[in-house]
Image (cartoon, rainbow, N blue to C red):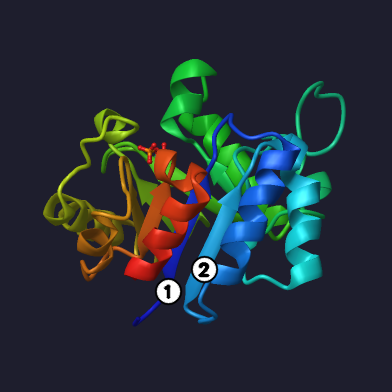
Amino acid sequence: MAGNTWIIANWKSNKNIAEALDWVSKVGPQIPKNENLKVVVCPTFTCLEEVKKAITVSNFPLMVGSQDLSPYSEGSYTGEEAGRILKDVIELSLLGHSERRKNFGETDEMVSNKVKQALDNNIIPLVCVQDENVSVPEGCKLVAYEPVWAIGSGTPDTPENDQQIAQVLKSKYGDIEVLCGGSVNSGNIKSFVSQPDISGALIGGASLNADEFIKILKEL
Ligand code: PGA
C-alpha cells in the first residue's frame, strides 16, 4: 500500500446507538493495523459520542467523522453543530455530499464556509464533488468524486473514468488525495484502489453491514 488508503463509511441517516455500537464491536477488531490505512466511520450526530467512546476504550484503529458541520462558528444558529463542539468527538467531516446539496440546498459557498470551520478546528474536511467542475474550497486536501447517478444505484463509475477525473482534480488543485464513491462494495473496491491516483473510497450502502465492510477491508 503506497500512500494513504482511506476507507470511509458514510452511514447517512441510518443506525441508532445500539446498532452503531454493534457495528463497531464487529468491525473494530478486524481492521488491519497499518499506518497508511485510514478507516473512518461517519455515524449520525446522535451516535458520535458513543461510537467515539467505544473506539477509544478498545483502541481500534478507526477514526470518527461527522456527515456535516456548521458553516458558522458557535452562536445563535439553531440546530447546527459547530466545529469547536464537534472536534471533541470527530477527526474528519464529510462536506458537500450531493444528498445535502440536493435535499438541503447546500451551495458551494456554504461548503466553502464549512471547510473553513473544519480547518479552524483541526478537523479534516472531506469534500464531495459530483464532477470535475465542482469547486474544491481552499485548504481542502481530501476530495471524494461521486457522480450522482452512481450513488446507491448499484452502478458504479468505471475505475478508469474515476482515475481520469482524479488526475484532472489533482492537476487543478495540486496536492490533494482523491477518493471514489458511488456503489463501491467488496466486489469492486480493488479495481478502484488499484488506480494510481485513487486514494480510497467513500462507501454508503455497503458500509452499513459489518460483514460486508470487513470484506471490503480484506480486499485491500
Ligand atoms: P453508496 O453511497 O455507496 O450507497 O452508493 C455512497 C455515498 O453516497 O457516499
For badge 2, the amino acid type reads Lys
Callout 2: SS: strand
Residue 195: x and y, percent?
A: 20, 66
Q: Taking 50 as reference, is 151 above or below it?
A: above
Q: Residue at x 62, y 40 (%)?
A: 114
Q: Nearer the viewer, residue 44 or 166?
A: 44
Disc on res. 38:
2
Disc on res. 171:
none
Q: Nearer the viewer, residue 154 or 209?
A: 209
Callout 1: SS: loop
Inspect this view and state whether residue 105 appears.
yes
For badge 1, the amino acid type reads Asn
Q: Residue at x 38, y 60 (%)?
A: 216
What crowding class fits label 2: few (fewer than 14 Cα within 10 Å), some (14-19), or many (20 or more)?
Answer: some
Residue 132: x and y, percent?
A: 26, 43
Residue 91: which quarter of the image?
A: bottom right
Q: Which residue is mark 1?
A: 4
Q: Taking 84 as reference, is 104 above or below it?
A: above
What crowding class fits label 1: few (fewer than 14 Cα within 10 Å), some (14-19), or many (20 or more)?
Answer: some
Q: Nearer the viewer, residue 174 or 30?
A: 30
Residue 129 as seen in the image, left or right of residue 138: left
Residue 35 as seen in the image, left or right of residue 98: right
Q: Marks 2 and 1: in contact by CB < 8 Å?
A: yes
Q: Nearer the viewer, residue 73 or 58?
A: 58
Residue 73: which quarter of the image?
A: top right
Q: Residue at x 26, y 66 (%)?
A: 197
Residue 6: x and y, percent?
A: 45, 64
How many numbered marks are there?
Answer: 2
Q: Residue at x 77, y 54 (%)?
A: 89
Q: Quadrant of the C terminus?
A: bottom left
Residue 189 as seen in the image, left or right of residue 121: left
